[in-house]
Amino acid sequence: MKVEELISAIGADFYTGVPDSQLKALCNYLMHTYGIDKEHHVIAANEGNCTALAAGYHLATGKVAVVYMQNSGEGNIINPVASLLNDAVYAIPVLFIVGWRGEPGVHDEPQHVYQGKVTCKLLEDMDIAYNIIDKDTTSEDIEKWMAGYRRLFEQGKSAAFVVKKGGLSYDEKVVYKNDYPMIREEIIRHIVEYTGKDIIVSTTGKASRELFEIREQNAQGHGRDFLTVGSMGHSSSIAMGVAINKPDKKVWCVDGDGAVLMHMGSMALLGANRLNNMVHIVINNGAHETVGGMATVADSIDLTGVAKACGYPNAICVNNYEDLDRALKDAKDKNELSFIEVKCGIGARDDLGRPTTTAKENKEAFMEYIR
């Protein structure tokens, strides 16, 4: 169905969420209509963040906000849904729109398979009524479901739409770009050159896919890399866990700005522990590029300053390859925790592949390598 029909039937005037490729039509509509406008549309750091933001909106206005997200974000909303929104606590209604990655019977990436199986069960466990939107859903269906939802909202209960692949469409094209000239895949190629035989933990999305392809092109094997295909925002914590227990090995974390923002508390933990065998690299293109390109707030904050404030003894921001190479060499040579923020353009090759090994094969090869 056309996303405009869904928006009209919902009748809300405030949307907040974390972008999802399954919800590209909705995300593009919101960007085309509102852009990033704190009065109508806020892209949040994580799904719990936008759920609490929706609660504040309701407290201030008495109206119901819409929270959109990929189903992988359900885990992030369990706490605020159960201990804040629930009608046994504050009875704050929210309408969730959930992209159904890993829908049973539909091929998807390994990180989505189990999440896809439990998507609807998790909503049921959180006492969130839901209906499923697919390509055959009509505006009349939405109107009928919304009538029932409004009765639930009056009782302080929440509701959700679960959107299948192809369930929403939008005809307007939205182009996401910035003015930084560096290319992420080339940045990772430079990182690979300087890290040598060191360990790399790479973040969710295209960064891990590009790292895998570079290893293939170099005929280097994949044992030294842990590709964090899911668990967005946690790659630096994974790297920290490895670095603590392998103090004789250099551990590099290749992170993204959207991932860092999602669980920024990990930077405080890293800075406080000051592991002298770890390097944290954040490739910052100011966008959730892997799921479509919608903006993060990372281009308007000083991530390098955050790292310094968290206690990283070495922190630098670079925006060209010459400075990147110098920073990589310095981090390689230093026996201290280092942070490198790399300003990056938005974009990737159209023919970018995906890892040909399974997640379990990656884990086993990685564990064997670091042994």
Image (spheres, rainbow, N blue to C red):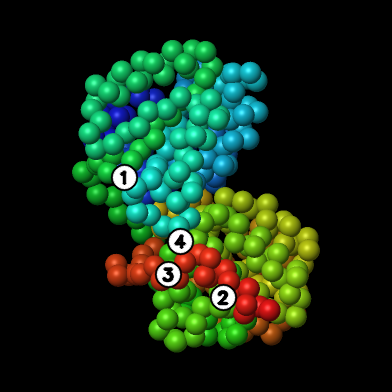
The residue wearing badge 3 is 355
Between the C-alphas of marks 3 and 4, the distance is 11 Å
Between the C-alphas of marks 3 and 2, the distance is 14 Å
Q: What residue lies at 59% left-to-right and 18% top-to-bottom?
A: 87
The residue wearing badge 2 is 365
Q: Residue type at mark 1? A: Lys
The residue wearing badge 4 is 205
Between the C-alphas of marks 2 and 1, the distance is 33 Å
The residue wearing badge 1 is 165
Q: Residue type at mark 2? A: Ala
Assign the C terminus to one quadrant of the image.
bottom right
Q: What residue lies at 40% left-to-right and 42% top-to-bottom?
A: 99
Q: Residue type at mark 3? A: Pro
**Camera-side residue: 178 or 47?**
47
Q: Which numbered disc, 1 or 4, marks the residue that appears first in the sequence?
A: 1
Q: What residue lies at 42% left-to-right and 81% top-to-bottom?
A: 216
Q: Residues within 10 Å of mark 2 (few under 14, many from 20)?
A: some
Relative to 172, is 9 above or below? above
Q: What residue lies at 45% left-to-right and 51% top-to-bottom?
A: 113
Residue extending farthest to the right is 273
Query: Which-is-in-front pick, marks 1 and 4?
Result: 1
Q: Position of residue 114 (x, y in %)?
A: 49, 49
Relative to 142, is 215 above or below? below
**Camera-side residue: 316 or 11?**
11
